[in-house]
Structures are given as structure tokens and as C-alpha cells.
């Protein structure tokens, strides 16, 4: 019976500590629960260690565990503030992105530096719906400080957006003397004439 009660006490202790840890993480902001920087990863490991140690170690004081969580919160807030104020400190704590591909060429030196191999590259490209044959289409590819692989394709290979089409049509209207502008005006005039003919046919039927 005593063993059962001990398990119940541990369950409620972990539940309480996890609830407090969740509040602490939410106070740290959405950035912490997104892609983790090295510092954020250390903070998360520290929170997990405090929860387990406080719950399982009978000699560990409960309020000492809460104090540890609050100390991590204070440390995270202080370092986040310093990172915001100082570019040098931000690079020191969070690291810097590493360029892996430039203008379709793999930078082997940076691959070796980050221990990023071709299998990793193939996997990341597959996540983006690409394969190794499309490396030549990449303008820039970086390994961000949080470990995320990001790419920028060559401009002429980017998908056309609705905004691009709107800007193109506006440019045609604003430059009617250009060859494309003149074609657009002729096309617009033909559409108006077809519409007029359609209206005349409707009236003649009446």
C-alpha cells in the first residue's frame, strides 16, 4: 500500500511540476517552443532534469525545484534581452547560419564544418519537394542556427504568384506604348467590340 501511495505522490508531483514548467515555457515566449537554438535546447533539457530530479529524489525539496524553474526563466529572459541588444552576444549564444549552397554550387568546406552530408541534403530537399538534380536551381541554401535547412530558388524558377500577375497587368496598363502594352490595348479593344456585338444580337432577338 505504501508503494502505491508513493507512486500516487510521484504522479501528482510530476503533474504539478509539469504544469509549472508549462507556465514557465509559455512565459519564455513562442520562440522557445518553435525551432530550438542551442541555448533554448539547454534550457529545455534543464527543465526536464529539474522535473525528474524533484519528483524522483526524496531528498530534493519541492520548492527548490520550483526555484530552479524560475531561475531558468530568469536566465532565459536575461540572455534573450542581451541577445536583442547585442549582435555579438546573439551570435555567441545562438550561433550563426552557415551557407551550404550558392548559385547552384555546393560549398564543401561548410559541409565539412557543419558535418552536413549528402544524405542530409537529399533528405532536406525531399522535404521541399526537390531532389539532387535541382541543386543547380538553388540560389542560396543555409543551415540556420536553429538547425533548419532553408533555400532560396533562382528568381526565374520561383512560382508565379497572384501578386506577380497583378503587377504585370498593371505594368501593361501603365505602359501602353510598349509592344506588350499595345497588344494588351488591342486585346482589350477586341473584348469590348465582342461585348458590343453580343449586346446588339440580344437586342435584335427581342
Image: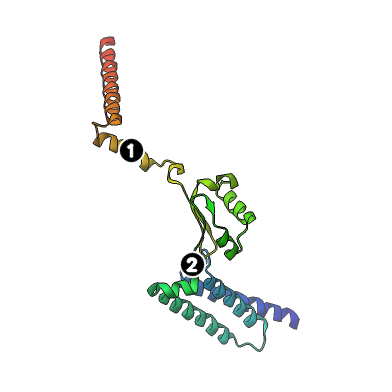
**Mark 1 sits on what residue?**
168
Q: Is label 2 or label 1 in front?
A: 2
Q: What element carries label 2?
A: loop
Quadrant including the N terminus: bottom right
Toward the viewer: 177 or 8? 177
Measured as percent of width and height from the top left, residue 85 is found at 38, 74
Toward the viewer: 61 or 25? 25
Say above or below: 184 vs 205: below
Q: Is mark 1 on a helix, strand or loop?
A: helix
Toward the viewer: 66 or 122? 122
Tell me the residue at 41%/77% (across/down): 82
Any part of residue 137 in sight: yes
Quick one: label 1, few (<14), some, or many (20+) residues within 10 Å?
A: few
In the rendered view, how is the structure colored?
Answer: rainbow
Measured as percent of width and height from the top left, residue 4 is found at 73, 78
Give the mark, 2 or 1, whose residue is nearer the N terminus.
Answer: 2
Quick one: label 2, few (<14), some, or many (20+) residues within 10 Å?
A: few
Tell me the residue at 51%/49% (across/down): 104
Measured as percent of width and height from the top left, residue 175 is found at 25, 35
Tell me the residue at 63%/87% (across/down): 60
Q: Left or right: where does residue 112 sit relative to residue 139? A: right
What is the total number of numbered labels drawn onto the structure image?
2
Measured as percent of width and height from the top left, residue 137 is found at 51, 46
Q: Left or right: where does residue 45 sit relative to residue 199? A: right
Quadrant in the picture for residue 116: bottom right
Mark number for residue 96?
2
Say above or below: 120 vs 82: above
Amino acid at each position: 500500500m505504501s508503494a502505491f501511495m508513493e507512486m500516487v505522490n510521484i504522479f501528482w508531483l510530476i503533474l504539478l511540476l509539469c504544469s509549472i514548467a508549462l507556465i514557465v515555457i509559455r512565459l519564455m515566449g513562442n520562440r522557445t517552443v518553435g525551432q530550438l537554438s542551442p541555448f533554448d535546447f539547454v534550457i529545455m533539457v534543464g527543465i526536464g532534469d529539474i522535473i525528474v530530479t524533484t519528483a524522483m529524489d526524496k531528498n530534493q525539496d519541492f520548492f527548490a525545484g520550483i526555484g530552479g524553474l524560475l531561475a531558468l526563466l530568469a536566465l532565459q529572459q536575461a540572455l534573450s534581452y542581451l541577445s536583442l541588444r547585442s549582435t555579438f552576444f546573439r551570435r555567441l549564444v545562438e550561433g550563426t547560419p552557415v551557407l551550404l549552397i550558392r548559385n547552384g554550387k555546393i560549398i564543401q568546406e561548410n559541409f565539412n564544418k557543419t558535418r552536413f552530408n549528402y544524405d542530409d541534403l537529399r533528405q532536406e530537399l525531399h522535404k521541399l519537394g526537390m531532389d539532387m538534380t535541382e541543386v543547380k536551381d538553388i540560389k542560396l541554401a543555409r543551415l540556420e542556427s536553429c538547425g533548419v535547412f532553408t533555400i532560396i530558388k533562382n528568381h526565374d524558377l520561383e512560382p508565379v504568384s497572384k501578386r506577380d500577375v497583378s503587377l504585370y497587368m498593371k505594368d501593361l496598363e501603365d505602359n501602353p506604348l510598349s509592344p506588350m502594352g499595345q497588344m494588351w490595348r488591342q486585346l482589350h479593344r477586341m473584348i469590348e467590340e465582342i461585348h458590343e456585338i453580343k449586346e446588339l444580337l440580344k437586342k435584335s432577338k427581342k
